[in-house]
Image: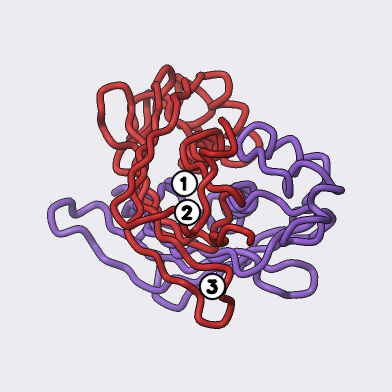
Chain colours: A red, B purple
Amino acid sequence: MSELDQLYLDDLDVGQRFTSGSYVMEAARIKEFAAEFDPQPFHLNEAAAQMSLFKGLVASGWHTAAVAMRLLVTGGLPFANGIIGVGGEIAWPRPTRPGDILRVESEIVEITPSRSKPHQGIVTIRSTMFNQHRDPVYMLTAKLLVFRRPI
Amino acid sequence: MSELDQLYLDDLDVGQRFTSGSYVMEAARIKEFAAEFDPQPFHLNEAAAQMSLFKGLVASGWHTAAVAMRLLVTGGLPFANGIIGVGGEIAWPRPTRPGDILRVESEIVEITPSRSKPHQGIVTIRSTMFNQHRDPVYMLTAKLLVFRRPI
C-alpha cells in the first residue's frame, strides 16, 4: 500500500467504507489459541465439542476478535497512525468454525474532533466480519484515536 | 477446584464477586502475539514503540483481552457450563506493558432468566483487569449464557 492510501483524520467522512482481505481459520490454530487463552472443551477437542452446545469445534471469541484485528491492521482500515482503540462494543452472533474464510467490512459512523487536542479526534467504526456464507460472525463498534495530517 | 465450586444459574446473585489468579505479561509474547494478530510498530519493537504515543512497548489490546479470558476461564469465573459470551463492551483505559502482573476482579450486575428457554439465562458480568499498581488496564462488561443445574 502506498503512502497515498494512508488516511488521516482530515481524509475521513461518515459513511466511508472499507473492506479487508481474507483469512482462513485453521482447526490447529483454533486449538492452540484456546490452549493458551481460552481452554474450554468446545475450543480444544472435536469430540468434546461435538457433545457441546456448539455441536462441533468453534474458535474462541477472542481468537475471532484477534483475527478481525489482523484483517483491519493489514489493509482493512488504512489509517496513517495505525489502529489505536480506546474501547467499543463486541458481539458474536454465531461461532467461527474450522475452514471458515473470514473478511471484515467497516464503515465510519461518527467522527468527533477533540476539543482540547486540535490534532486528534475519535472516529467510531462499525466493523462486521463475515464467513464464506456471508453470515456475520463478529461485530465490533470501536472508538479509535485518529490524528490529523502533520503540517 | 472441586465440583462444588462450579456454579450454575441457580447459584448466582447480583453483587456476587470473583477474583482470578494472576498472569505476568512477557515482552516476547507481546511481540509474538502482535506479529500474528496486530502487527503495529508499538507492539512489535521497543525502539519504534519508544517513538510512539505509548513511549514504550505495549501489548495489543486483543492480547490483553485474551489474557483476561484466560484468567476468567482458569478459576476467575467458576461457571459449571464454561464461559460462553454473546457480546459485551470493552475498554482499555491504559496500556499493558512488559512485566505487568495482571489480575481480574468480576461482579455480577444483572441476571435475566430466558423467557423461552427455562433452563438458561443471560448473566451480565462486569470484569476489571488491574496491573500490579492496581491501575485498571481493561474493562469488560460481558453477557454470558449460563445454564440451570441439571435436575
Chain where mark 1 sits: B
| Helix, strand or loop under label 2 | loop
Q: Which three-letter amino acid code belongs to the residue tagged 1?
A: Gly
Residue A120: percent from the left, percent from the top?
A: 56, 68
Identified at 47% across, 24% down, the residue is A23
Chain where mark 2 sits: B
Q: Pointer 2: residues within 10 angstroms few (<14), some, or many (20+)?
A: many
Residue B51: percent from the left, percent from the top?
A: 80, 55
According to the image, label 2 marks what residue? B79
Q: Residue furthest left?
A: B116
Q: Residue furthest bottom?
A: A116
Identified at 58% across, 58% down, the residue is A149
Identified at 73% across, 75% down, the residue is B134
Q: Is residue A112 above or below residue A109?
A: below
According to the image, label 3 marks what residue? B17
| Helix, strand or loop under label 3 | strand
Q: Are marks 1 and 2 in contact (CB under 8 Å)?
A: yes
Chain where mark 3 sits: B
Q: Relative to residue B84, is residue A14 drawn left or right? A: left
Q: Which three-letter amino acid code belongs to the residue tagged 2?
A: Phe
Q: Is residue B69 visible?
A: no
Quarter where residue A125 is shown = bottom left
Q: Pointer 3: residues within 10 angstroms few (<14), some, or many (20+)?
A: some
Q: Between residues A57 and A148, which one lies in front from this camera angle?
A: A148
According to the image, label 1 marks what residue? B82
